[in-house]
Every structure is written in structure tokens, then in C-alpha cells.
Amino acid sequence: MRRTRPTDSSGPGRALQALGIGLLAVALAGCSSSGSTTSSASSAASAPAPAPSDSAQSSTDQPQSGFLAGLHTTSTVASTIPENLDVNPYAVTVATTTAGKITKGDVLVDNFNSKANFQGTGTTIVQIDPQGQLTTFAQIPANQPGCPGGIGLTTAMTELASGYVIVGSAPSTDGTTATQGAGCLLVLNPQGQVASTIQGGDLDGPWDLTATDQGSTATLYVTNTLHGIQAVGQPVQQAGTVVRVQLNEPADAAPTVTSETVIGSGFPEQADANTFVDGPTGLALGTDGTLYVADRLGNRIAAIPQAATRSDSAGTGTTLTSGGRLDGPLSMALAPNGDLLVANGLNGQLVEVTTTGKQVANTWLDQDPAQTPAGSGDLFGIAVTADHSGVYFAMDDNNALGVIK
């Protein structure tokens, strides 16, 4: 997904000015980045939203509780624009292991667009230390073997205990699904070099993921949004999937796949000129083994029970909660208290949901008045900070990493 920001001919973009970036080329890239304009009405028209749940409270004026109730201040950590000027930050991952270039506590952020602002063509992962220092962790060749269709890095990214990084690609050559490729999962060593790829089988447009790591083995849960997707103009396809990928994880070599199982299927997905593709996105694994899925077009959070052990598909799962404070749910993360944190795609808010389905809080992360409604299309990847004191979030409208504490 992306948003187009008009170029400010009078000088650098306001967000990059605040970051103190003085290079005009970088500033202009930031201002014109992050995709084409979208109204919430056009996006919501793709599929009717379910009726609000009993717990619905749509305003931050309503009582707040849970983890988000203690977070009040948002700030910018750093720009996410690397040397090659890629834009449109998507995935946000906090490193849990020190290895190679990576230091525990660093934040990895990837980019979905190239500097030409075409969706599905971003090839870089940046690394931001706790002081806000930006470096490029990886720049993947656009013609990387083993990744059909090219490279366009998505919200699917994690670091394993071995220090290897896995990141998804849903590529295009012209920014539209008319030229999409099936994509892949790229396996990068701790130096940011491609060690191997995982493609084919049940993977088609890996869009987001979450992972558990047992040391010698790891499990990935991956949403896929390009099954049956063609050019814009198709009706909604009931073909989005969730795939469990089991990995063998050697201490000093790239992980290898031992099995793949489709555990969720039939999620609504649709090609969109403004957002590339809409479909199931964020994932979070509860302590009881339930996998929660952000169903973007259904405007709900779905639940798939026994995600680690089931051998069949749960279909679209059961509905944990729908409507209410949710507004096009995208990325998701587990809060320190076990609740779900959900980034809305159609406004700039973060929503907290308990695993019993109660929507207990929502807070603004991005109130960009240039969008309708404010902050629409600006939020993507989220991750809890290393010290559990706040939440990092990717800000698509100004190509930056933000934090709320």
C-alpha cells in the first residue's frame, strides 16, 4: 500500500525538515513518496465492513485502558530513506539478537517503493539504532534469483535467533498488480546478504508474517495476498491465505524449510490502483496458540485456533472483533500485557484489543490533515520497543520511523 504526497516546490518536505535533513534531493524524494492518493470511501467500497461490535467506541475521547492508556507522546526517531532513495517504509522489526551488522535493540525497516515511487520495487532494509542513526542493512538485487517477478519488500519481516533475517517480497515492474510476480521470502545472513530464498508452493505475495523461535527450529506464519489476483478491476477474491512454514535453524547456516501448511484460507483480497493489493495482513500469536489475523477488507480481527499444530485450514477463522475502533486493520503486534495492537489503514490510529475481543483503547499516531480522514493510509508496520515502554511505527506519509511512549 502507498500514498502519493505532492512535491513541495517551495522547499524540503515538512517531515524531513523536522528531521534536519538538508539535502534537497532527499527531501523531495520524501515528499513525493509513498504512493497514490486514496480516500477512505474508495478503499472501503472494496468490501462491506461488518457491523460494529458491542465494544465499539470510535473516538479517542472514550475511556482508555490497557497498555495504550500509558502512552501519550509521539516523536520521530529517524528518516527511513536510504542512500538509494527508496521510499514507502513497510515492515518494522526490533532486533532481539546481536549478530553481524545487527545489534540487539536496533530497528530494521524495509521499503516497498523505489525512488521512482513504483509499488513493489523497493529493495532496501535500513537499520536504525536507539539514537536514531540510520544505515543500510541490505540492498537486494532487483533481479535476485529465486524470487519470481523481482523485489518489492513487504511488511513480512523478522529476525531469527541465529541472526538471519527473513523478509517478504511482493514485486511489480510498474507499480501495479498487472505486472506482479509471485514473490518469495528472502533469507538474509546477519551481514545483510541473500543466503537463500523460499518460494513457490503455497506462497504467493507474502504480505506479512510473525514468527516463533525455538533455537534449533523456527515457525513462520505468513499471510499471502496475490492468489488469483490480476489487474485492477477484478471483484473481491476470496483467496487470501495464511501459511505456516516450519524451519530447521542451524546455528551457523541459513534456515531450511521442513514443511508448509495452509492454516487459513478464503480471506478477501483485491487489487487496487491506489494500494496495490488489499487483503489479510498483520499477524500475532497469542499465548494460548491462537493466531490472530488482521482481515483488512473484512474490517475485523480473525482468530485461528491451534495454529502451531493444526493440519488443516480453519478457513477465515472466527471473528474476535469487528468494526468499532477498527478502520481497515493492517499490521499487528502483541502488547506486553498480551493484548493485540492493531494499526488502522484508513485512519492514523493504533487500536488495542484484548484476546476476549474487547476494544479497550485507540490513540492517534498520525493525524496528517492532508489525508481524508486524517492519517488515512499513513501507517504500516508496528513493533513494541525493546524495553516494552512504547511502540515503533512506520510513517508512510513522510518516510520515517516514529515512536509513541
Image: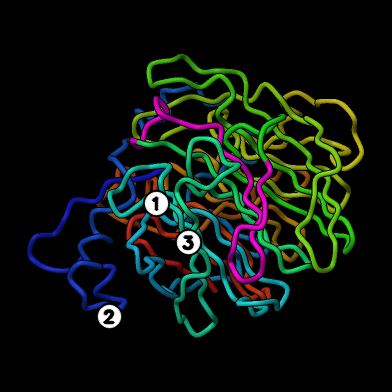
Which percent across, then down, holds residue 382? Answer: 56, 58
Q: State the residue in front, 307 or 365.
A: 307
Q: Nearer the viewer, mark 3 or mark 2?
A: 3
**Residue range (magenta):** 174-198
Q: Is residue 178 magenta?
A: yes
Is 66 rendered above or below residue 318?
below
Q: Nearer the viewer, mark 3 or mark 1?
A: 3
How far, Cα to Cα, is label 1 from label 2?
Answer: 21 Å
Which secondary structure lies at badge 3? strand
**Apparent side of residue 211 relative to residue 75 in the rendered image (left or right):** right
Q: Which residue lies under the disc numbered 1?
A: 378
Residue at point 47% right, 74% down? 73
How far, Cα to Cα, is label 3 from label 1?
Answer: 24 Å
* Residue 165 visible somewhere in the drawing: yes
Question: In the rendered structure, which amino acid carries the disc numbered 2?
Answer: Gly
Q: Which residue lies under the disc numbered 3?
A: 139
Is 333 rendered above or below residue 51?
below
